[in-house]
Amino acid sequence: MKRHQNALLLLVVVLLAALPLWLVKAPIPADASQPSGIFTGTDDKARVLISQISPDYKPWFTPLLQPASSEIASLLFALQAALGAGFIGYYLGVSLSREKQQRIDQQKSVEQPDAD
């Protein structure tokens, strides 16, 4: 039962991650010259604002990897955030477990001083 339960939970997680990308429809952009993006972020907003403030502005570098669409860029950003959160959670869990184990070992050594 537990094997099926884990598979079902994994399936639910995959569906929760994939279904919004298929079901959400792109909004119609107010300006036809700009692409419509559902998952746009502050980078796109900053790019539009900079082009309004200084139309002749040219970026002083180009990124090494350019994602195919803004949705893929958002996906990569979310993946990066998830990996970072996972690493921090793992580190905190290991640190707390080590501290708890040290306390248990100290209590055992106090209770049984001649056990060595």
Image: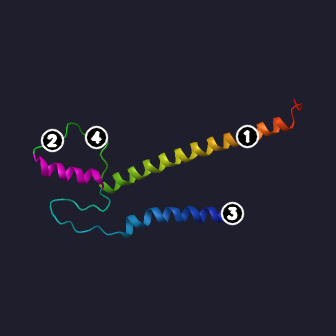
Mark 4 vs mark 1, CA separation in Å: 49 Å
Distance from the alpha carbon under mark 1 to that under mark 2:
59 Å
Q: What residue is disc 1 on? A: 103
Instruction: Mark 4 and mark 2 in contact? Answer it, CB < 8 Å.
Output: no
Residue mark closest to the camera, 4 vs 1 = 1
Relative side of 106 to 37, left or right: right
SS under mark 2: loop
Q: Which amino acid type is shown beneath numbered disc 1? A: Arg
* Magenta highlight range: 41-55
Residue at 18% x, 52% y: name it.
49
- Residue farthest along the right direction in this orientation: 114
Residue pointed to by mark 3 = 2
Q: Amino acid at mark 2?
A: Lys
Could you tell which of marks 4 and 1 lies nearer the N-terminus? 4
Height in image: 102 above or below 14?
A: above
Location of residue 37 (image quadrant): bottom left
Mark 3 Cα-neighbour bin, 10 Å: few <14, some 14–19, many ≥20: few
**Residue 66 in the image: x percent, y percent?**
29, 45
Q: Is residue 29 magenta?
A: no
**If the image is split into quadrants, where does the C terminus sit?**
top right
CA gap between label 4 and label 3 equals: 45 Å
Residue 46 falls within the magenta-colored stretch: yes
User: Which of the 4 image quadrants contains residue 109?
Assistant: top right
Q: Main secondary structure of the magenta part?
A: helix
Q: Residue placed at 58% from the left, 45% from the top?
A: 90
Mark-to-mark CA distance, 3 and 1: 33 Å
**Of the image marks 1 and 2, the number of the one nearer the N terminus:** 2
In three-dimensional space, the C-alpha distance between marks 3 and 2, rounded to whole angstroms, equals 57 Å
Question: Which label was assigned to residue 63?
Answer: 4
